Amino acid sequence: MSDNDELDRQEARSANSVLHNGIRVLRSFSVDEPALGVTEIARRVDLHKSTVSRLLNQLEQLDLVLRDPESGRFRLGLGLIGIAGPLLANLDVRRVAYPSLERLTERTGETSALVVWSGHESVSVEQVPSPKLVKHTTPIGTRYTTAASSSVQVFLAELPEGRARELLERGLVRSERRDDAEVSGYLERLAAVRSSGVAINAGETHVEEVGISAPVRDHRGHLVAALLLSAPSFRVSEQLRDQLAGVVRETAAEISTRLGAPGCDGDGPPHP
């Protein structure tokens, strides 16, 4: 065997080791413990802290992990969604929702999308674009991070008030103001979203766009996604906006019913 062959073998072993350890680091996170420090990860994967730190730096550059600048702890990054794109196509909620998205776009002529929650922002995982020349699209991977975003309102309305307040006050969910009066007023708005089963963003994040969202629930009644309809503001009068809100709520209830959610009739939150 030549020296070049041996060198190739060594490089392959080294690459395999890095890849293997990187996957072990990613697998150390869990639903119950989504945020971990370097020391905790090193203990779980049985590697030296310096090795884990180098791996995390590389994974962070690839958007596979995200470091909280305040705590120094890491979370899984949204770059994993891009890698898991083919798998996401087979997720039950996406598969079940897609025909309803198509019907919603056909019925309204506007872009419909399905978004999920990542802990402090909503992320688009499916969309059916409007057939019209002028439209607003939400391609897979689009992130919504502002408090006024209709999908963000849907997810925050589901959280305990203390957690929603924390996300706002820490700026993890972006808002123009974070003083007590502003936060309290926003929490009242979330209560209205819970009551009505629909959230509206009437040009608050972008003057040219209207967004309308409603919750999608699974067989346990848990919020698993939000349905989002996006349209140019010039096409949506206040009266039409209210009509579209009803259609979005009905469609979200339809998807929820197909997922086995109890008591979804499209007229508001699911019945107990």
Image (spheres, rainbow, N blue to C red):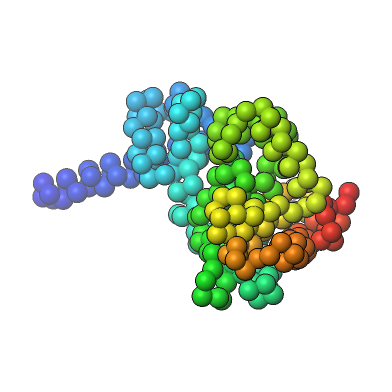
| Position above or below: 192 against 109 | above
Q: Is residue 255 above or below residue 145?
A: below
15 relative to 262 in the view: left or right? left
Residue at the image point whose x is 56% and y is 76% from the top: 131
Q: Position of residue 53 (x, y in %)?
A: 37, 29
Residue at 16 percent of width and 45 percent of height: 7
**One can see residue 161 in this view:** yes
Q: Is residue 13 left or right of residue 127?
A: left
**Image x and y of residue 65, in percent:** 45, 39
Q: Nearer the viewer, residue 11 or 128?
A: 128
Examine the rendering and report whether any part of residue 24 can be seen: no
Along the line of sight, the residue nearer the viewer: 12 or 115: 115
Quarter location, residue 13: top left
Q: What is the number of callouts on the image?
A: 0
Q: Position of residue 253 (x, y in %)?
A: 78, 61
Q: Is residue 260 above or below residue 30?
A: below
Left or right of 108 on screen, residue 260: right
Residue drawn at 75 percent across, 38 percent down = 188
**Front position in the image: 28 or 183:** 183
Report the residue at 44% width, 44% height from top.
64
Seen from this angle, which residue lies furthest right? 272
> Residue 114 lies in what quarter of the image?
bottom right
